[in-house]
Amino acid sequence: MSAILDILPMSSWIDTQGKPLIIAGPCSAETEEQVRETVSQIKTEGYAHVIRAGVWKPRTRPGSFEGMGEAALPWLVAAREETGLPIAIEVATPQHVELALKYGIDILWIGARTTVNPFNVQDLADALQGADVPVLIKNPVNPDLALWIGAFERINRAGIKKLGAIHRGFSNAQENKFRNSPMWNIAVELKTMFPELPLIGDPSHMAGKRAYLYELAQRALDLNYDGLIIESHRDPDKAWSDASQQLTPKALGEMLHELSIRQAEYGADFQSNLETLRSKIDNLDRELLEILGTRMSLVEQLGEYKRDNNVAVLQMNRWRELRKSRGDLGKQMNLYADFVEELFELIHMTSIRKQTEVMNSAPVA
């Protein structure tokens, strides 16, 4: 997958003075008083570079609070005037874009439910033609890197060069701890492909519960993310949307103070030690691949034996035994259980594929 984005550095649209970008504010702009009080407390705490608030809320089911719409925009403009902090909101339709630009909103973001639909993203791109406003794009609901990249390409082709990515996690039926599974590898792959693209972590939507916010925020910073977007409310338990994942401005400040910010650059001694360790890892990776190659050769022989003796490829008893024994071995070696399970599921599926190819080929005369 190859793509090129013509984007400007984050410093061209926000000055964080070398610190990670912090975007904070309520999930929803509920009332003028709630916005003013929450934003005032955030400003007093001194950690935020940008204020966020939901104006239009795309809810999963009708009947929930879906935002105040245009009525909330003057509240945010007033909040910007009082605090001197730029304002960011989500837009999901061309009409949202038109109103946001009319009121001079500083930063726009595209939500996960919109990113997932190329038709909707293209409508927004068309509405943004000729605008000079930063646009942040959340990952799509489902884990599809190409879909995420496609959204950046569409908005970039509309002339928007101030772009950033928001990683808010992905829907996953198997996840039972977080609201959305982080799947860090997808965001890291995006950053690898586009190192100039600012990457902002959204622990609020990953977590779904405030108890996990610190853990997820720290992980994002450990991965050298460029910033965080976190929901904060003057009285979280009484919030009209997503109450369980919001913090008071003071609690958010305390959490941010506890986070450790890792150095992106390092000295010569560190580099030397790093290269030594990486060299050892490279050698082990080579050995791993050689072992996998040997294993696949044995799998091919197994396929030939099954073919010649008319035996089915998939043997469920063997697979159940393999999953349990490899899981037990992994536990003894202090490996994550889910890692071992996923690894051997992949190895097993590849083995089935190889044996199926052998079974459907004629034996060598």
Image (tube, helix red, strand yellow):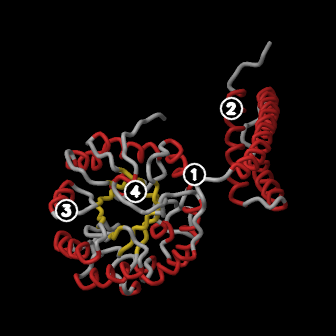
Q: Residue at label 2?
A: 356
Q: Residue at label 3?
A: 104
- What's the residue at 48%, 72% (across, down)? 208
Question: Is 267 placed left or right of 276 in the picture?
Answer: left
Q: Label 3 vs label 4: CA separation? A: 21 Å
Quadrant (top left, top right, bottom left, bottom right) of the C terminus? top right
Q: Residues within 10 Å of mark 3 (few under 14, many from 20)?
A: some
Q: Label 1 vs label 3: CA separation? A: 36 Å
Disc sitting over residue 185 in the figure: 1
Q: Earlier in the sequence, mark 4 or mark 1?
A: 4
Q: Earlier in the sequence, mark 2 or mark 1?
A: 1
Q: Earlier in the sequence, mark 2 or mark 4?
A: 4
Question: Is 111 placed left or right of 98 in the picture?
Answer: right
Q: Is any part of residue 201 visible from this angle?
A: no
In the rendered structure, which amino acid carries the disc numbered 1? Asn
Q: Is any part of residue 224 visible from this angle?
A: yes
- Cβ–Cβ under 8 Å for marks 4 and 1: no
Where does the image place residue 60, in percent across and percent down from the top left? 35, 66
Q: Residue at label 4?
A: 138
In the rendered structure, which amino acid carries the disc numbered 2? Thr
In the rendered structure, which amino acid carries the disc numbered 4? Lys
Question: Helix, strand or loop at disc 1?
Answer: helix
* Foreground pick, 71 / 46: 46
Q: Residues within 10 Å of mark 2 (few under 14, many from 20)?
A: some
Where does the image place residue 340, in percent across and percent down from the top left? 73, 54
Q: Splitting the image into 4 quarters, where does residue 355 fall?
A: top right
Q: Earlier in the sequence, mark 3 or mark 4?
A: 3
Where does the image place residue 157, in percent across and percent down from the top left? 29, 39
> Which tag is nearer the camera, tag 2 or tag 3?
3
